[in-house]
Image (cartoon, rainbow, N blue to C red):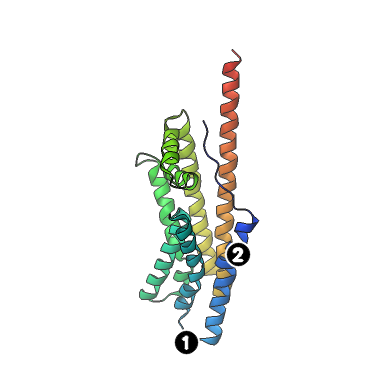
Amino acid sequence: MSVPSPRVPGLRQFLPFLLLDVVCPYLTYRYLQRYHPGIPQALALVLSGVFPALANLISIARSRSLDIIGVIVLLGLLVGAASILLGGNPRLALVRESFVTGALAIVCLASLVAGPRPLLFYVGRDFSTGHNPARIAEFNRLWQRPGAPHVFRVMTAAWGVGWIVEVALKVLIVFSLTIPQALLIGPIESGVITALLILWTMRYVRGVRRRAEAARAARSAF
């Protein structure tokens, strides 16, 4: 059974993440707090999230599609804006993406027992096909191959648990550290968890392929 491998960002893709998701939000927050002290902390944090949101909007405009990471960032910005209306708690603004990530974790685990296919099947299709109809149809046929449902269910369970860990660590960071520290460390923690999940997924898929190839070789030997 062949499952497309996830794409791992290289160094060139990782540097924009550091710039737009870590450095720019931190510098924006520090600038607003120093030179515009009248701005509430929660609003300053939401404004600092404009940079990662802008990066995702540019990506959406280029690809003319919305991937799951873009959904997390953009919905997180909306959640952060809503936190201002609900009292302006800066800690809630800091964990804005984690509300969405937590919801996705629940959807991941729920899709294992409800729904026609687990969530990672649709995520993998989104990342692998570029929304090309022919490639989507080819990817959909993967589900009919022996062992494919099990593979996608294992990946979905792993990502669901991984996202729960990410949310728990983010909450711990936000409520244990100062706001500037959390603003720096929080995105890095999220990026590391995501990178580890991608690397695990690649290793798992390669293992599935090797076992499938070994099985085919054993059958052809008889």
Tag count: 2
Q: In which image quadrant can residue 113 be found?
A: top left
Rounded to the nearest whole Å, what is the CA distance between mark 1 and mark 2?
28 Å
In front here: 152 or 110? 152
**What is the residue that sits farthest to the top in this orientation?**
222
Q: Which mark is residue 86?
A: none
In front here: 189 or 146? 146
Residue 141, can we see it? Answer: yes
Q: Are marks 1 and 2 in contact (CB under 8 Å)?
A: no
Q: Which mark is residue 18?
A: 2
**What is the residue that sits farthest to the right in this orientation?**
11
Secondary element at image label 1: loop
In front here: 171 or 122? 122
User: At which x and y percent is residue 162?
Assistant: 51, 50
Secondary element at image label 2: helix
Seen in the picture, residue 13 relative to 47 is either above or below; the reply is above
* Image quadrant in which the C terminus is located: top right
Q: Which mark is residue 38?
A: 1
Mark 1 Cα within 10 Å, few/some/many (few <14, many 20+)?
Answer: few
User: At which x and y percent is residue 87?
Assistant: 38, 76
Residue 177, can we see it? Answer: no
Asked if residue 181 lies left or right of residue 84, the reply is right
Residue found at x 58% / y 17%: 220
Mark 2 Cα within 10 Å, few/some/many (few <14, many 20+)?
Answer: some
Amino acid at pointer 2: Leu
Question: Which tag, 1 or 2, sits closer to the chain's start?
Answer: 2
Amino acid at pointer 1: Gly
Residue found at x 49% / y 39%: 154
Residue found at x 44% / y 51%: 105
User: At which x and y percent is residue 102?
Assistant: 44, 56
User: At which x and y percent is residue 54?
Assistant: 48, 67
Mark 1 vs mark 2: in front: 2
